[in-house]
Amino acid sequence: MDPARPHRTVLLSCLARCHEFRIGLHPSGADRLAPRRVGRLRQVEILAEQALHPHYRLNPERFNRKKNTAPGDATLKRRLTICGIAAVLLLGLAPGADAQYDPRARLQPQGLGVSPTFEGWYPNPDGTYTLSFGYFNKNTDEVVTIPVGESNSVSPGPTDQGQPTYFDARRGYGIFTVVVPADFGPDDRVTWTLERNGERYSIPGGLLDSYQTANLHAPAIDMYPPVLVMRDGGPEVRGAAGDWTETAVRVGEPLELTVDAWDEHGHEVSVWFYKYRGPGAVAFAADEVDLELGHRTATTTATFDTPGEYVVYVRTGQTERGVREAGLEQCCWSNGYVTVTVTQ
């Protein structure tokens, strides 16, 4: 048994507890928390995520393969202590205040639901606003599928607004966005609802002051999202509001996926490929492509085992940084999506 596994479990429990407080799932009544404390909860979430691994990305099991720097038992003990102290100081949680609640009960290998998360918003040059959403799959092992419909919907507007239907275990950050008009008011909301196994979560997103992010520049570390180009002649995308393209292939035939990605400020970038939607399995020849400086093209193949409509999610970010290392700013990565029609 991995000697660090118990500490990872407790860190994941800390993360789950902070997240549930923030989105109002905790039985002690998180809806009474002041806005300042909500912001502090987000800070502790980040601390727990970074404590798990310095290169914690969309899937925390995907460590940086180049550096092979998964933290050992002693390192995790130190990080766990820091996280615990921070949780008590920032949240004001006394050990006896909630003795009936065991945060580990909110994590198990399978059978639990998936909660949407509202990551934040940022203004666009044309006066509109972009709202960014992610998710928290409370299963430590199980990948969950929730088709678009009553159990996976965005409102107001069309039920389908580009949200995922395939949820890797644990946390997915800033994986899709909704653009709202310039007259979207401070009290208006866009709500993403997910239901599974009797657990139903509806998480609203809006123009809340404490959730304004700097997706296109992280001043604290002076980083910017890489450029992502999804197709020949396509737009240069920067940030979470990704470009969509489409293609077709037959069952069992490898589909070549080629994108260009680069950092305008001299950092190496990596490109990751994930299943985002679809009725069957998707096998990637490589789900991560690391690009050295001077190289821009990332290529892999995807093979589909069942006919239907799929979406492949493409993400690029700096090779040496995790998704949340820029803190509350939700920077720096860029998204892209490929709709694939698979026929027999």
Image: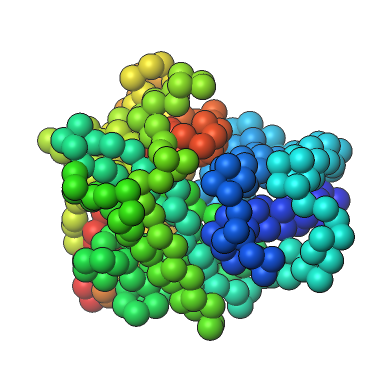
* 333 in relation to 285, above or below: above
* 105 in relation to 322, above or below: below
Left-right relation of 17 to 221: right
Compare residues 270 and 170 and report the one nearer the observer: 170
**Quarter of the image where one finds residue 335:** top left
Compare residues 249 and 51 and report the one nearer the observer: 51
Residue lying at 71% horizontally and 41% vertically, measured from the top left: 90
**x and y, in percent, of residue 52 in the image:** 69, 44
Residue lying at 58% horizontally and 49% vertically, measured from the top left: 34
**x and y, in percent, of residue 133 in the image:** 40, 53
Residue lying at 77% horizontally and 68% vertically, measured from the top left: 101
**Quarter of the image where one finds residue 339:** bottom left
Residue 105 in view, yes or no: yes
Residue lying at 26% horizontally and 62% vertically, measured from the top left: 161
Compare residues 214 and 293 and report the one nearer the observer: 214
Q: How is the image coloured?
A: rainbow
Quadrant location of the N terminus? bottom right
